[in-house]
Each structure stands twice: as structure tokens, then as C-alpha cells.
Image: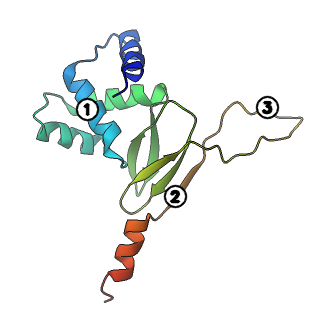
Amino acid sequence: MDKSLLELITSELHKRNMRLTMPRRRIMEIFALSGRLQTAQDLYLSAKKEGLPVGLTTIYRLLGILTEIGLARTYLLNGETKYIFCSPQHHHHLICTRCGMYREIFECLVLPMETTDFQPESHHLDFFGVCYNCAEKCKTAPKG
């Protein structure tokens, strides 16, 4: 994980009277490197597989802080709250609704708005669909 990103996270945790412990750091690495939508339970199970001594409350707290500072985003899909790790730079997402894969797009696809009665301060643009791998699996899946 990038040093400046770790410094930002460490600073934000300190503001909330929390430390960046090795288990929390490892959870963030797992989350950032997953490339998929994750539930808090998914991250908890990944942490347990690695033998990390954390509880589900710690996972939720960490996800909440990451969301507050813009390093995570939440989505409600199929009745579940799922999270993705976000780069600090402005970006958009392509999100597969089948396997949960996501990709960040750093080119801003939104043209500057011309309006006299509204001043945009930020925006989010996400595309939901089916990734190439899932589309290929559907083509070869036996019908029945």
C-alpha cells in the first residue's frame, strides 16, 4: 500500500482515537487488493483465514472510516451492503453485478455542466453490468 495513503489513513484513525495496528493494516491491504465488491463479512472471513485477531465490529468501524474519508464506497446490491476500495484520485467505476469485480476509470466521463442556477461540487458515476469473463461464462453455460 502506498506510503502517502497509509499516512492519510493513520492520520484519520488517530483523529478517531484509533491506531493503525498490523491487523487493521492487513485488512486494508486485503480489501484494496481484492478488486471485488466485499461485504464486511467477506473481509472478516478473509481476516480469520489469515489468523488476524479482529472482530466484525473492527471491520465495520474500519469500513466506516474509509468511507468517510473517500477511500471506500458503499453499494446496496441484492439486499447486501457491499464496499469497494477507492483510490484518492477522482475516478468512476465499472462494476460487474455477477462476480463483483470492479475497475476504476480515471478519465472523467462527465462533461462540465453549463448551468446558471446550480454549482456542482462533486459527482459519482458508476456503470453496472456484466464483465467479459461473466459474459463468456454465460455463453458457454449449458442451457437447461
The residue labelled by disc 3 is: 119
Q: Quadrant of the N terminus?
A: top left
Q: Does dot 2 land on a helix, a strand or a loop?
A: strand
Q: CA distance from mark 2 to mark 1?
A: 26 Å
According to the image, label 2 marks what residue? 128
Q: How many marks?
A: 3
Q: Position of residue 7 (x, y in %)?
A: 38, 16
Q: Nearer the viewer, residue 101 or 107?
A: 107
Residue for badge 1: 27
Query: Residue at left 37%, top 48%?
Result: 37
In the shown orientation, is residue 113 left or right of residue 107? right
Residue mark closest to the camera, 1 vs 3: 1
- What residue sits 25% from the left and 40% below the top? 43
Coloring scheme of the render? Answer: rainbow
**Residue 38 in view in this figure:** no
Tag 2: residue type?
Answer: Phe
Measured from the top left, where is residue 90 in percent x and y?
58, 35
Q: Residue furthest right?
A: 116
Q: Is residue 74 above or below residue 138?
A: above
Residue visible at 34% across and 37% down in the picture: 32
